[in-house]
Image: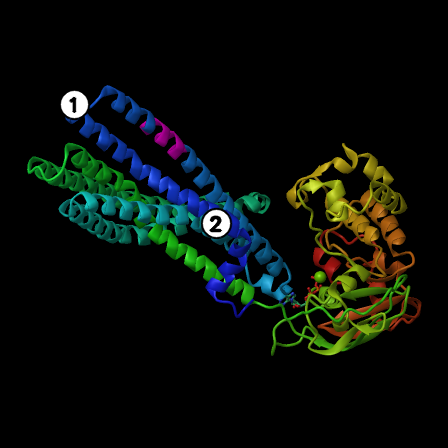
């Protein structure tokens, strides 16, 4: 994709729609012709009247005029419909490709960009492009054809009249372009501050709990006024400019009308043209206003659309550094084995490594309890295992194969993860459990719920699997979110499970529920439990203590417990095993 030019990119998405484009062009041209024919009929009508022609002819002319007007209307509707249709079809294909391209990018790529930026790139830009295909093509092509057609028709009647109309069109077009040129920068500033305002509002609303709890309402409100004031001033500036431009334009058109009326009258009284032709000249001048307006307006749209094509290409040019391994024909089931082979890793090249020379293995079915201060690199281990990031030196092996050799899909099916904060979607419980996979039947879900010992919890849901979860998990407790994450992982039946325990503490009832869930989830699987509470590592076979990305202790849990000089034994002695006092909340994460 990266080598493609703008034109090649457009061609890829336009080609499948060529038939629609052809029909659109035909409709467009017929529409223009009909628009130009209307006044011609009236012109003949006027000439017939002034020559005292037959009433029957006039009636006929009236009928024809009505039919032409009706057909014109229908063609107009069809053109607009087809234009929108073509515009959205082409850009939707592009939108889908861009979205899936973005989803394939490295996690690091996403860390560098805000969700807002993506929405703007994948949706905002392409809406501009959709407009380009539909509105722009119709407006610009249509307007240009209409202008040219009118000038030619008038020229055929009298070249002086044609020259006058042509001159009028060119001058007005130039004047409008200059005028609008002044309006654009102000408009950009205004949109920018409206975006700032909305962004500000969204962020504060999302943080409402923290803001309230910290009594920061006044500060937020003060900032709110500042942002609002800027927007207000800029809006007023923009509207002032717009109204000046609007009145100038109106005057310009009025001036043009009087001029052309003068020309038509002069030619008529000179007997150079008929009364009908004079009417035609004036009527065509009136008809020029809309295309002139549209042409100059669309000139800016064109620039915006070109910019969005460039940005789409930029996005396509990004390639993930993490690529799928070769497709190995593998059917591994059951508990997985896993090895970190002298792994060193830093999030950014050249920085101090977050993990240094990590070297350990887990055999199938083994449960590792992973302990360490906050920031010691526990979560990073799970990210490497998922190949969300690439190791710098060394290798991570799953079932004896380097993860770089595996298909990402296979790898991520083989490893299940329950993260520190579970992401819930605004959807039903069912969709939240299956990750929108319709292949998973309700029976399977019910069975998973039962196996994990969550039937009681499930029975309390108001509408069973159809209960709605609001976005961000509102309405569900942290514990319940964890339970959902368990079922999710269980349904995918991975060979290795990573539990990155939430550091928030749960009420005893939920905790007991989770304990049971964990036991069921880990049965027959290899596991890494990243523990913030010593209680959870009681089920571990092996203990690993990390400090600043290095292993400071690794061994069978029981022998560490028995060895009074071990760090683990010391941790147990310090009494972190059971409820941590509220006065020392930091101790909880510093196990
Ligand atoms: P916690 O107990 O708080 O969950 P952790 O042991 O899981 O901590 P990690 O999340 O693995 O710690 O982080 C290890 C180090 O890497 C920290 O110093 C952290 O600041 C850094 N780090 C984590 N994620 C990133 C990232 N995406 N980019 C850069 N640095 C990161
Ligand atoms: Mg962590």
Magenta region's main secondary structure?
Answer: helix
Please say whether residue 72 is one of the residues in the magenta stretch: yes
* 2 or 1: mark nearer the eye: 1
Please say whether residue 155 is one of the residues in the magenta stretch: no
Q: What is the spatial separation of the Cα atoms under label 2 and label 1, in whole angstroms?
A: 47 Å
Circle 2 — which element?
helix
Q: Residues within 10 Å of mark 2 (few under 14, many from 20)?
A: some
Q: Earlier in the sequence, mark 2 or mark 1?
A: 2
> Residues in magenta?
65-73
Question: In the drawing, does residue 207 fall left or right of residue 129?
Answer: right
Q: Is residue 479 above or below residue 41?
A: below
Asked whether residue 472 is in view, the answer is yes
Q: Residue at x 54, y 48 (%)?
A: 89
Q: Do the CB atoms of the residues marked 2 and 1 lie less than 8 Å apart?
A: no
Q: Nearer the viewer, residue 298 or 238?
A: 298
**Residue under numbered circle 1:** 52
Q: Nearer the viewer, residue 215 or 294?
A: 294
**Residue under numbered circle 2:** 21
Q: Residue at x 7, y 35 (%)?
A: 269
């Amino acid at each position: 994709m990266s080598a493609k030019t703008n034109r090649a990119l457009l061609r890829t998405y336009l080609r499948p729609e060529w038939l629609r484009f052809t029909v659109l062009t035909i409709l467009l041209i017929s529409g223009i012709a009909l628009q130009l024919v209307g006044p011609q009929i009236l012109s003949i009508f006027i000439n017939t009247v002034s020559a005292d022609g037959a009433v029957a002819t006039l009636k006929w002319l009236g009928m024809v005029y009505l039919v032409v007007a009706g057909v014109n209307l229908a063609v107009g509707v069809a053109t607009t419909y087809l234009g929108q249709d073509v515009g959205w079809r082409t850009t939707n294909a592009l939108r889908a490709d861009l979205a899936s391209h973005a989803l394939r990018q490295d996690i690091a790529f996403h860390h560098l960009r805000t969700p807002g930026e993506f929405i703007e790139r994948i949706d905002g830009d392409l809406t501009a492009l959709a407009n380009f295909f539909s509105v722009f093509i119709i407006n610009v092509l249509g307007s240009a054809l209409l202008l040219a057609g009118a000038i030619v028709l008038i020229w055929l009647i009298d070249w002086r009249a044609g020259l006058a109309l042509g001159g009028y069109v060119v001058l007005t077009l130039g004047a409008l372009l200059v005028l609008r040129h002044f309006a654009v920068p102000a408009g950009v500033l205004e949109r920018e501050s409206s975006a700032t305002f909305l962004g500000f509002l969204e962020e504060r609303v999302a943080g409402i709990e923290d803001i309230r709890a910290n009594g920061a309402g006044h500060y937020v409100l003060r900032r709110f006024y500042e942002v609002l004031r800027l927007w207000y001033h800029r809006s007023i500036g923009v509207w002032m400019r717009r109204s000046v431009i609007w009145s100038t334009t109106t005057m310009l058109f009025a001036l043009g009308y009087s001029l052309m009326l003068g020309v038509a009258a002069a030619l008529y009284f000179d007997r150079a043209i008929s009364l009908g032709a004079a009417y035609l000249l004036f009527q065509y001048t009136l008809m020029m206003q809309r295309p002139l307006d549209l042409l100059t307006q669309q000139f800016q749209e064109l620039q915006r659309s070109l910019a969005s094509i460039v940005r789409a290409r930029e996005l396509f040019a990004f390639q993930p550094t993490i690529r799928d391994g070769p497709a190995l024909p593998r059917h591994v089931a059951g508990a997985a084995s896993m090895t970190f082979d002298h792994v060193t890793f830093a999030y950014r090249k050249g920085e101090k490594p977050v993990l240094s020379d990590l070297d350990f293995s887990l055999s199938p079915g083994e449960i590792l309890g992973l302990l360490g201060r906050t920031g010691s690199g526990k979560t990073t281990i799970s990210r490497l295992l998922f190949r969300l990031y690439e190791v710098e030196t060394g290798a991570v092996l799953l079932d004896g194969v380097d993860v770089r050799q595996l298909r990402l899909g296979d790898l991520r099916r083989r490893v299940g993860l329950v993260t520190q904060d579970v992401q819930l979607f605004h959807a039903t419980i069912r969709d939240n459990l299956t990750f929108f996979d319709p292949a998973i039947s309700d029976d399977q879900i019910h069975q998973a719920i039962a196996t994990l010992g969550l039937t009681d919890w499930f029975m309390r849901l108001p509408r069973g699997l159809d209960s709605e979860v609001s976005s961000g998990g509102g309405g569900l407790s942290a514990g319940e979110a964890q339970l959902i994450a368990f079922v999710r992982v269980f349904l995918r039946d991975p060979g290795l499970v990573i539990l990155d325990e939430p550091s928030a503490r749960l009420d005893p009832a939920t905790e007991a529920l989770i304990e049971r869930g964990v036991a069921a989830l880990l049965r027959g699987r290899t596991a890494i439990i990243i523990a913030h509470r010593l209680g959870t590592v009681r089920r571990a076979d092996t203990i690993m203590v990390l400090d600043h990305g290095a292993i400071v202790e690794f061994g069978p849990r029981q022998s560490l417990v028995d060895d009074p000089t071990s760090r683990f034994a010391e941790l147990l002695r310090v009494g972190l095993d059971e409820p941590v006092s509220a006065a020392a909340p930091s101790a909880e994460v510093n196990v």
